[in-house]
Amino acid sequence: MRSQTIEVVTGSRDRVHDITSECESFVRSCGGDGLLNVFVPHATAGVALLELGSGSDDDLLAALEGLLPADDRWRHAHGSRGHGRSHVMPALIPPYATVPVLSGRLALGTWQSIAVVDLNVDNLERQVRLSFLSD
């Protein structure tokens, strides 16, 4: 297994941050066939595979806002208003994803991208662990 950590700046607003190019670069350097595991070691972020740049990322954020509003209903209440929703989000968008790799290339669908989803406006930076598993 080969592993690498990348840093992602998600900023001070709800964010869907595309990390596909970093993932592509990593698996290209590994070469061969295997699996890429993408993991965010944070209790308030997730990893999603979805189409980006065509409004889908904004649609995802709108859906999450509808399901997990940034209001005062959350028992986990430290930090910014609605912070507790960030701790619930990884149950909906898990903190990991696994993608097949064929000949050093991600075997994603035509419109699929890999993104970090972050609703926690209190943490501006995230680490993402990329792990390439092969035989």
Image: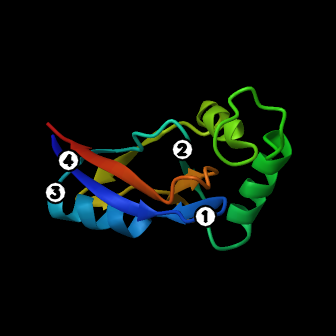
| Residue carrying label 2 | 46
Q: Nearer the viewer, residue 104 or 81?
A: 81
Q: CA distance from mark 1 to mark 3?
A: 33 Å
Which marked residue is nearer to the observer: mark 3 or mark 2? 2
Give the left or right position of residue 19, taking residue 105 as reference.
right
| Residue carrying label 1 | 12
Q: Residue at x 54, y 45 (%)?
A: 45
Which marked residue is nearer to the observer: mark 1 or mark 3? 1
| Residue carrying label 4 | 3
Say whether disc 1 or disc 3 marks the residue closer to the N-terminus.
Answer: 1
SS class, disc 2: strand
Query: Which percent across, then down, holds residue 71?
Result: 83, 43
SS class, disc 4: strand
Q: CA distance from mark 3 to mark 2?
A: 24 Å
What amino acid is at disc 4?
Answer: Ser
Q: CA distance from mark 3 to mark 4?
A: 10 Å
Give the left or right position of residue 105, taking residue 92 as reference.
left
SS class, disc 3: helix
